[in-house]
Image (cartoon, helix red, strand yellow):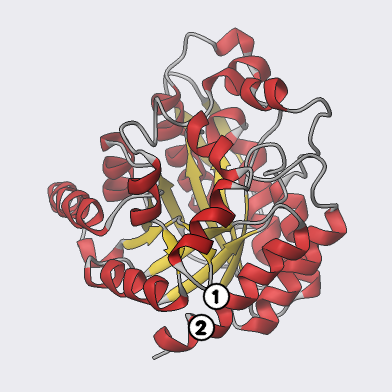
Amino acid sequence: MKFGIETPNCLAGMMYPVPFATARDVVDLAVEAEQLGYHDVGCNDHLSTQQYVRDAWVTPPDYFEPLITLSHIAARTSVLRLSTAILVLPMRSPILAAKQIATLDHLSDGRVIIGAAVGGYRDEFETVLPEWADRSRAELMHEGIQALRVLFEAPSSTFEGRHYRFEGVESYPKPVQSPLPIYSGGNVEGSLRRAAELCQGWLPAKLGPGQVKEKRARLDAYARDAGRDPADITTALQSVVCIGDTPEKARELLEKSAFDLFRKSLAKTMTKGVDIDRYIDINLIGTPDQVCEKVAAFQDAGVEHFCGTLFVGNTVEEMADQIRLFARHVLPAFSG
C-alpha cells in the first residue's frame, strides 16, 4: 500500500482556517513527509477563491500554484513522488500544462503523478473563464487528457477537438516517464470512463470500501471494452485522516476543525446524502486501531494508493501531528 499526504498549498478557507500555511510551511511539511516514509505529497489546484470560502472568511486565503510549489519540493527531496490531487485541467491550457508537467518531471527525475479532474466548484471555473461558462467541464476534461497525451508522446503534436485545437506543436522535452501517470479524479461515471480509456489510475474521494469495489468493477468493464488491461490502472483514494485516543476524541477534533465547513460545501455534489456519521465511517477517522482496520478494508476492496490524504488540524502544527501519528501507527502496519 502506498500513502501520500496532501499539502495545504490551496486548502486554507476550505479545510483549514484563514490564514493557515505559508509557502515555506507547505514545503517543510513535504520534506518531513519524505523523512517519515510517505510515498508521495500532493498539491491541490485553485486559481480563485470559491464563493463559500468568501462567505465564511473575511480575509482571502493564499493559494500557492501547485506545479511551481512541487518544483520547489522536488529540489528539497530525493525519492518522494510529487502528485497533483487535484489539477483542475479545464481551467488550464493543455499546451502550457504539458510543458509545465514535463519540466517538473525532468526536474524531479521522473517523480510526477498527475491527478486531474473537473474540479469541485463550478463557480470558480466561471470566475476564471466566464466566456466558457456554458461549456461542459467533462468534455474539457476528456479533451484535455487526450491533448496531454498527444503533447507528451508525439514528435509533432496536432489535436482537433471541440474545445481545444492546435497544429504542429513541438513540445519538448517529453516527460521522463513514459507514460507519465495520470489519475482520473472523481466519483462519477465520467471519471471512471476517463480512467478506463485514457489514464493510469482512478482517484475518487471519500467513498466507502463497498462503493470503491462496485465502481471499480464498472471501470474494469470499461477498460476491457477499450481494449485495455484493467490491471494497468491503479485504484487510488483520497481520504480524510483524524486520529484520536478514543473515537469520541477523533470526532471532536473533526467537528471543531474547518473540515466540517468543507464537508458541507460539497453536500449537493460529492458528499450528497452523506451525513456526519457516514462521513466518519468512510474516512480514516478514529483511533489508530480503527484507522488501520479501515485501511485494511479499503485494501481488500482494491485500493492500492491513498493519494493526497487530507489531515485534520486547525494549525499547521496540529496537521503535522496527525501526519506523524499516521506515520507512527499506520505506515508500519502496511509496509510489506
Residue 326 marker:
1
Q: Residue 95 at x, y = what percent?
A: 62, 37
Query: 16 or 290, which lies in front?
Result: 290
Query: 72 or 279, which lies in front?
Result: 279
Query: Residue at horizontal 67%, vertical 38%?
Result: 96
Look at the image and tell me in which quarter the C terminus lies: bottom left
Q: Which residue is mark 2?
A: 329
Q: Secondary structure at mark 2?
A: helix
Q: Is residue 196 at least partly visible in the picture?
A: yes
Query: Residue at horizontal 51%, vertical 33%?
Result: 119
Query: Residue at horizontal 22%, vertical 50%?
Result: 211
Image vertical order of residue 328 relative to residue 172, above or below: below
Q: Residue 21 at x, y = what percent?
A: 80, 52
Question: In the image, is 83 to the left or to the right of 138?
Answer: right
Q: How many numbered marks are there? A: 2
Query: How many residues crowd around disc 1 within 10 Å: few (fewer than 14), some, or many (20 or more)?
Result: many
Q: Residue 89 at x, y = what percent?
A: 54, 36
Q: Residue 5 at x, y = what percent?
A: 59, 64
Q: Is residue 170 at least partly visible in the picture?
A: no
Task: Please say if the residues under marks 1 and 2 sit with CB atoms less than 8 Å apart.
Answer: yes
Amino acid under disc 2: His
Q: Secondary structure at mark 1?
A: helix
Image vertical order of residue 180 relative to residue 169, above or below: below
